[in-house]
Image (cartoon, helix red, strand yellow):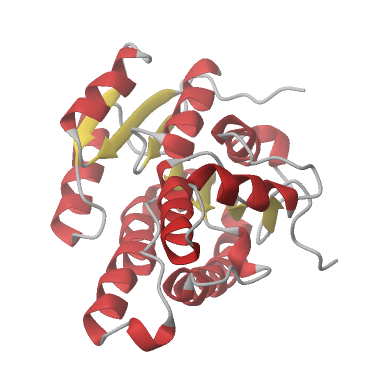
Amino acid sequence: MELKLENKIVLVTAGSKGIGLATALGFYNCGAKVAICGRSQDKLDAAAAQMPGCLAMIGDVSKAEDIDQLIAAVTKEFGPIDILVNNAGGPPPGLFADLADEHWEQAIELTLMSVIRATRLVLPHMRTQKWGRIINISSSGVKQPVPNLTLSNSIRMAVLGWAKTLANQVAADNVLVNTVCPGFTQTDRIAQILEQQATASGKSIDEVAAALAAQVPMQRIGQPEEIANLAVFLGSEAASYMTGTAIQVDGGSVQSF
């Protein structure tokens, strides 16, 4: 299979750890020029050390000015972006009754507006050159809601609706828009969820993790690299007739067809 990713210019937001880092490494190992951003300099330095020549920048994707600066920096260093991977840490867990307006507003900025703003900036070049990839890292919660993730379940559905609509609008320009929907994956996010559930239930984190894995048909929690493999494929020439999709990588957890 020919991925044809050599020298493609890729920006992975929130790419200093977890699924973002695994995705950045996947593109890098296929010969792409990779840029990442994150909010921790230490984590960015550690990530960049694994990818010599990578552009690693401090940036908070919930802030419009940071996105502007990130896109400008990548364009100056490498050239216009060919592949955008929209990734960000998920909004915090919580029941609807516990969420105030500010929680919803913050989640919208992080989960929805970050994707819209970054895509708006890279799309004109992609359409002009008649080649581009927009890949959104979402959650299996858009297929089957995850208990207690009220903000994530709600706002990621808005991103999914936007992505499907955009895919139809830019398909004729060979700009493909797809969404990766991870299930439970070994990241800081899952650690946060496990800790919250352990506190609520009075069980140990190990007990909660074992119970969570038992709910997955494959009987385990996924690894970031297993999510990244799909993202890299969707960014490649091999996925040239795929757009508007939302594909879960979840060990079989989602039970709908």
Q: In the rendered image, which quarter is residue 246 located in?
A: bottom right
Where's the N terminus, which quadrant? top right
Q: Is residue 59 above or below residue 97?
A: above
Instruction: Residue 78 in the image: state x and y as whole percent.
Output: 30, 26
x 31%, y 63%: residue: 110
x 20%, y 36%: residue: 40
Q: Is residue 31 above or below residue 230?
A: above
Instruction: Residue 199 in the image: state x and y as whole percent.
Output: 41, 60
Instruction: Residue 218 in the image: state x and y as whole percent.
Output: 79, 42
Residue 35 relative to residue 132: left or right: left
x 69%, y 53%: residue: 248
Q: In the rendered image, which quarter is residue 61 located in?
A: bottom left
Q: Of 198 and 87, which appears nearest the observer? A: 198
Q: Of 239 and 255, which appears nearest the observer? A: 255
Whether residue 126 appears in this view of the structure is no
Where's the C terminus, which quadrant? bottom right
x 50%, y 33%: residue: 23
Q: Residue furthest front?
A: 202
Instruction: Residue 256 in the image: state x and y as whole percent.
Output: 81, 68
Whether residue 103 appears in this view of the structure is yes
